């Protein structure tokens, strides 16, 4: 839908550029670049300042700098590693800087002689005796004909194998020349009123500046995403994202779903039998979900709640509404242990009502599995709990009305679509409730999940006590063991969680087994149990049951207990090597304690020395038990892709925008999307196409 020269640029293939042969075309296509327009929107990751020479006396460790000076001495050193060492000095009065080369040729060593003059660019580091640059870029300088300095900052592009930065600069130089021909300008799909309100520069000017920033531009402003040119492009991408999700949502509302008008009989009976009263937040979200299920189009609702907030009982009530209306429910969890915990809870709640939840996982084989699948297909299973096994082709539902997905970001897009399609009957699809205990700041959740309605359980059940968290080096391991002894002697229970840097489940389980043996020997008066992912259900269930019943004092486990384990008497958790885990996982693990009225504690038993990011993570965990506050800080540290697991599932793939770093732009992007939908609907398709191409639905299901 773009016009004029921009339309031509979107159609000019990259193989029309100088230096682009079949191999380069193939490499560019791997990262989604097929046209000149694609090149223009492939922005640098960062910039180097080669526009000015820095006096050697002014160099600071950690900075990248361009220096020029005379070689004072050069030679080969034989320390731990053989290296070519070149001492460079200028007139700034310092002792100079050492250039160090671990890989060098005989000709290179011969050319770097005292008296020669070099211009070098590299990162300044602390060396044993002085500041150093290791393998800097350099060129020989003639005193009478000094090479000119760059007049723009040097862009560093995200790249792929086989493409050097010099190639990217050559390609983007040509793309910018084409952009400038005949005053070509990309079509402005942001309305004038939006651009004027936020004082955004024109799109073409923003692109030119970001590819070749003038020397006057602050590298710090670009790095901190403060420059208006970068904010303008990030804003437009966020607007396109909003429009794509809202268009998908509008499309979803044209699809039919079963109207689940239950008579509330089962729900009333369950609420009467529960040993606790729902919190105000649980009642609120239950009614929001109930209203959705009574509509003739699919519910798409994200239920967000911190660990221990009571999402499972809300899911149970939604399930009963579907069963009351004569439909089946599928509840899907990412791990067998979590699905097992859901099964236990649902059995406790539903069996007294005459409903038997069915369980289907990868462990069910042969005749047993065939019987379970037949019961699901025949409609005998009103509620089925399972793992990825529910995706398999031979699993069919007679009348699936509701799909509940727990910790949805751990499932791939295609898996979730496959489960949804199992309920497609007579042009209807089931309602979907997506649950997560990964707290997401509300403004960010409403932006990233604009196609979903959002429900938040923002209060914990009464009687819960905040967990006190301490970080202790493993050199004080005996003190921690003594603390376990003391807690268990007082009638409390404890968890000891083992982690390994190696992701191998076999090695993790072996570490847990070794730890359990060592702790049993160190604590002879305590009853020690062990659970890990490689135990069969028949082996694991009795251990978990004994721990829940108070027949075990200490449970040694791998991170399989991250979710779904609820033992109110457990008041102490030890997490070994917490520096190897992310904040969200640590918070989930810590949520296994603090479920009763007794004051609870979590000890992070780390191995020194800690890296700065690990130290920051543990400090955040010590300072806060608020999952939403922890999530905000986690997002700032790692970005939404890693926190939400979306780099694996492909849901969120922003090119320029950073929803965590650009959070201040999100409300304005939502407003702009509203303006475009209401007053400029012709802009919707070109904006989405520019930023996301064919990925209009972003894998949403």
Image: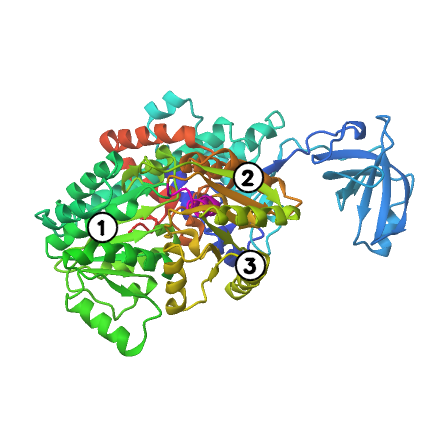
The relative height of residue 395 versus residue 676 in the rendered view (above or below) is below
Return the residue at label 1.
316
In front: label 1 or label 2: 2
Q: Mark 1 vs mark 2: which is more N-terminal?
A: 1
On screen, residue 441 above or below 489: above
Q: Position of residue 429 (x, y in %)?
A: 18, 55
Q: Nearer the viewer, residue 301 or 577?
A: 577
Whether residue 375 is visible: yes
Which one is in front in this view, the residue at disc 3 or the one at disc 1?
3
Query: Which residue in the protein does label 2 denote?
Result: 470
Along the viewing direction, whichever of 620 and 541 lies nearer the viewer: 541
C-alpha span from label 3 to label 2: 26 Å
SS for dot 3? loop
Between 201 and 424, the one lying in front of the other is 424
- First of labels 3, 2 by sequence position: 2
Q: In terms of depth relative to the viewer, which is nearer, 347 or 108?
A: 347
The residue drawn where x is 83% and y is 56% is: 105
Instruction: Indicate yes or no whether the magenta region holds residue 201.
Output: no
Q: Is residue 586 magenta?
A: yes
Identify the image quadrant of residue 449.
top left
What residue range appears in magenta? 584-596
Look at mark 3 in the image and give the residue it sits on: 524
């Amino acid at each position: 839908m773009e016009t004029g020269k921009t339309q031509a640029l979107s159609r000019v293939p990259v193989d029309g550029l100088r230096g682009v042969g079949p191999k380069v075309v193939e490499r560019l296509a791997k990262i989604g670049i097929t046209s000149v327009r694609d090149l223009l929107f492939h922005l640098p990751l960062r910039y180097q300042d080669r526009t000015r020479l820095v006096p050697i006396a002014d160099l600071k460790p950690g900075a990248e700098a361009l220096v020029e000076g005379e070689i004072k001495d050069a030679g080969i050193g034989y320390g731990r590693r053989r290296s070519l060492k070149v001492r460079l000095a200028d007139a700034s009065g310092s002792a100079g800087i050492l250039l160090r080369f671990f890989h060098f040729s005989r000709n290179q060593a011969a050319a770097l002689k005292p008296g020669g003059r070099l211009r070098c660019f590299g990162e300044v580091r602390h060396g044993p005796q002085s500041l150093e640059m290791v393998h800097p870029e350099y060129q020989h300088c003639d005193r009478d004909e000094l090479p000119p300095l760059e007049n723009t900052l040097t862009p560093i592009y995200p790249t792929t194998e086989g493409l050097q930065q010099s190639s990217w600069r050559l390609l983007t130089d040509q793309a910018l020349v084409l952009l400038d021909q005949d005053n070509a300008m990309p079509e402005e799909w942001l309305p004038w009123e939006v651009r004027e309100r936020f004082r955004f520069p024109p799109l073409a000017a923003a692109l030119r500046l970001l590819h070749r920033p003038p020397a006057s531009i602050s590298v710090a402003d670009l790095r901190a995403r403060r420059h208006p040119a970068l904010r303008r492009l990030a804003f437009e991408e966020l607007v396109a994202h909003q429009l794509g999700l809202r268009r998908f949502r509008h499309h979803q509302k044209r699809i039919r779903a079963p109207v689940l008008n239950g008579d509330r009989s089962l729900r009333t009976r369950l609420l009467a039998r529960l040993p606790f009263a729902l919190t105000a937040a649980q009642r609120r979200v239950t009614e929001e979900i109930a209203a959705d299920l009574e509509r003739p189009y699919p519910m798409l609702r994200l239920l967000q709640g911190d660990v221990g907030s009571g999402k499972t009982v809300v899911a149970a009530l939604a399930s009963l509404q579907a069963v009351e209306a004569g439909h089946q429910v599928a509840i899907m969890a990412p791990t067998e242990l979590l699905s097992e915990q859901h099964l236990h809870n649902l059995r406790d709640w539903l069996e007294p009502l005459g409903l038997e939840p069915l369980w289907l996982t990868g462990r069910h084989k042969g005749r047993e599995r065939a019987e379970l699948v037949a019961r699901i297909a025949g409609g005998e299973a009103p509620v089925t709990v399972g793992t990825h096994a529910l995706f398999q082709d031979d699993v069919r539902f007679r009348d699936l009305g509701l799909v509940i997905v727990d910790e949805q970001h751990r499932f791939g897009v295609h898996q979730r679509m496959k489960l949804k399609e199992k309920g497609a009957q007579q042009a209807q699809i089931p309602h979907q409730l997506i649950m997560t205990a990964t707290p997401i700041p509300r403004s960010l959740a409403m932006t990233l999940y604009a196609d979903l309605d959002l429900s938040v359980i923002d209060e914990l059940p009464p009687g819960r006590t905040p967990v006190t968290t301490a970080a202790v080096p493993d050199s004080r391991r005996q003190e921690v063991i003594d603390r376990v002894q003391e807690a268990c002697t007082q009638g409390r229970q404890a968890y000891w969680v083992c982690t390994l840097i190696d992701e191998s489940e076999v090695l993790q389980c072996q570490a847990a087994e070794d730890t359990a043996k060592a702790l049993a020997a160190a604590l002879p008066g305590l009853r020690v149990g062990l659970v890990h992912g490689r135990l069969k259900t028949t082996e694991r269930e009795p251990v978990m049951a004994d721990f829940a019943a108070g027949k075990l004092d200490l449970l040694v486990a791998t991170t399989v207990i991250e979710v779904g384990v609820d033992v109110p008497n457990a008041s102490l958790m030890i997490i070994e090597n917490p520096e190897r885990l992310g904040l969200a996982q640590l918070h989930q693990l810590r949520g296994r304690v603090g479920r009763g009225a007794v004051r609870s504690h979590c000890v992070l038993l780390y191995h020194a020395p800690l890296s700065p990011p690990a130290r920051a993570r543990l400090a955040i965990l010590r300072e806060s038990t608020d999952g939403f506050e922890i999530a905000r800080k986690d997002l700032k540290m790692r970005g939404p892709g890693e926190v939400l697991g979306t780099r694996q599932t492909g849901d969120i793939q922003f090119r320029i925008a950073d929803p965590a770093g650009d959070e201040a732009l999100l409300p304005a992007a939502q407003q702009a999307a509203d303006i475009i939908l209401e007053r400029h609907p012709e802009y919707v398709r070109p904006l989405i196409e520019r930023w996301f191409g064919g990925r209009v639905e972003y894998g949403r299901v």
